[in-house]
Image (tube, helix red, strand yellow):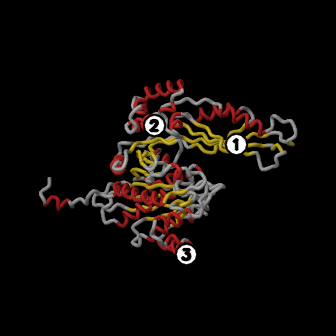
Amino acid sequence: MTAGIVSGRLRRWLAAAALFVAAPGLAAASPVAWLQTYLSFDTSTPPGGELPAVRYLAALIERHDPRGEIDVRILVSPDGRANLYARLPANAVEAAGHSLVLLHHVDVVPAGEGWRRAPFGGELHRGRIWGRGALDAKSLGIAHLEAMLHLLDSELPRRRDLVFLASADEEAGGESGVGWLLEEHGELFEDAEAVLNEAGVNRMAGDRLLWWGIETAQKQVLWLRVTAAGRGGHGSGFNPASPTHRLLRALNRVLDLEHAWRVTPASHQAYRALAALRPGEFADVFDRPLEVVQAELDRRRREGRLDRILLPGMSASFRDTVQITRIDNGAGPVNVAPGEATALVDARLLPDTDVEGFRRRVETALGSGIHAEELLRSGGSPVSSTSSDVYRTLERVLGVRAPVGPTMIAGTTDSRFFRRLGVDAYGFSPFTLSADDAGGIHGVDERIPVEGFLRGCEMMKRVVAALVLADREPAPASAAAGQGEP
């Protein structure tokens, strides 16, 4: 498909009509049915294939917007990756002149083997909706859609434009999704004040929510394909320098690299805020200036006492990490040593790590004759503000149920593209899930409880309404003057 915009009311209605025949869930008004149908589209990256799913979302909007208030556009990148842009304009007398962007990604990681239910079945089973994307991130997309349609139906004035953005290619780096959209269609986002995206980290204790974690910062990503080539041969021969052997030794040297523990401004902000919610030893360590926290972590590492204060997954916030995610030496028989062996390396780097310097260290460790090809370099991005109107509103609305604090994630999301343009982006999940249900992200049997999903949709509606609706419709200037106001 060539790059361009699928636009025009007639063309969209024709696409919608076709989907009513193909997708029974479209006619249902329930967000559960919407999510089930959305999950039935296989949007695995590669290759993505987002267009049918994007058309489905566009048709849902068209069905609920007979007056055509929402500007709906399907934007397709040169390599055929489809993105959906839908804008509901402000209608308050005194609008803010800015927009709020609700962002989620349409593509998903491949399902893999071992599922107990069909990964693209959208099946409702034992109170849960099953399917790849049920957590990452199609459920979030449906919650966003519900929030936008709720405001469309509301008679209250909207002070901000609301943009619903369903993007392609996030799981492969986002260059054909949000990266391409901001480069080629940047005018659509010039008034963006803030973005709500994935990656909120809510801390649970059983069924009890301890706090809402709003993602404001993230690590960098560096993906490498490492290749060793040379003499293969029969498996019975003596060949200690075969490509596979050389690759394994080189990867061991990379894994043995030492990475300093560093408290960055992003991690310091996140855990100092969290200290107020965890009095005791945690607060004694983290509710201090950055330099003091650094010294205390160094001391506890030497003494082997870090486990007393670090929460699960927290150590990745203080160091660069390396994972060997795949080793491939072909599909030949066991008695053939191949002439080439490759591995994929996933490095997650602190926000202030010098990526070039890190890559040079890796290449030095790999040694001569081992080639490292760069697949993705996400680059760094600024930390989103915790004093903005949007963040303060999140604190006010969510704080009724549990405290709110900023967090830094070890992964990377499309938020970084907006942050580089000076737009605050916040990772917010309205879903509060048990560890068992949340464990399906990028794994087998991904699923979301129906009850938790519906509660999350309601929470998203409250949050978005608080961010978009005007407190009250201002009186016209003439009426105000007639009442004797100064």
Residue on which disc 1 sits? 343
Residue 163's quadrant in the figure?
A: bottom left
Q: In which quarter of the image is the N terminus?
A: bottom right
374 sits left or right of 447 in the view: right
Q: Mark 2 to mark 3: distance in Å?
A: 49 Å
Mark 1 vs mark 2, CA separation in Å: 31 Å
Please name whichever residue, 226 or 147, is drawn nearer the observer in this view of the structure.
147
Which quadrant holds residue 96?
A: bottom left
- Amino acid at circle 3: Val
Q: Residue under label 2, please give it.
A: 266
Give the spatial CA distance, label 3 vs label 1: 45 Å
Which mark is first along the chain, 2 or 1? 2
Q: What secondary structure is found at the residue carrying circle 1?
A: strand
Residue 476: x percent and y percent? 21, 61
The foreground one among 233 and 176 is 233
The residue under label 3 is 21
> What amino acid is found at the position of numbered circle 2 in the picture?
Ala
